[in-house]
Image (cartoon, rainbow, N blue to C red):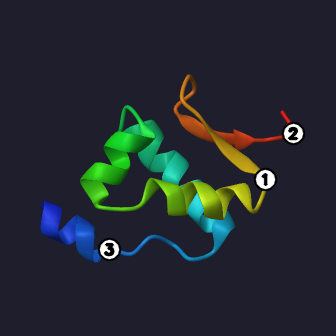
Amino acid sequence: MNRREKRSMELPQDANILLSYVNLKLRDFYSSLDAMCEDLDESRAQIEEKLSGIGYVYDPEKNRFVSQSV
């Protein structure tokens, strides 16, 4: 998949599906949230805002979104 194809794919709109999608991408393909956002041409702030709405924050040490209650 080339960069243009990656850009044409939209992130899931449902926050719970987005959580699963982003964590899978971080686990399998990217070393950081910044690297993923840059490669996919997505807004880090928008992703973090949407996922904080369901109680998740990015943990750079784990390179994944985790529950705020943990």
How far apart in space, not on screen, are marks 1 and 3 (Cα)?
25 Å
Dot 1: element: loop
Vertical placement of residue 7 versus 51, above or below: below
Read off the residue under disc 3: 9
State which tag comes first along the sequence, 3 or 2.
3
- Pinpoint residue 13: horizontal percent, then vertical percent: 56, 77
- Pinpoint residue 46: horizontal percent, then vertical percent: 52, 63
The residue lying toward the viewer, choosing from 41 and 29, is 41
Instruction: Describe residue 22's horizontal placement relative to residue 43 as left or right.
Output: right
C-beta proximity under 8 Å, tags 3 and 2: no
The mark found on residue 1 in the picture is: none
Vertical placement of residue 5 versus 37, above or below: below
The mark found on residue 55 in the picture is: 1
- Pinpoint residue 15: horizontal percent, then vertical percent: 65, 68
- Pinpoint residue 6: horizontal percent, then vertical percent: 24, 65
Read off the residue under disc 2: 69
Vertical placement of residue 27 versus 36, above or below: above
Dot 3: element: loop
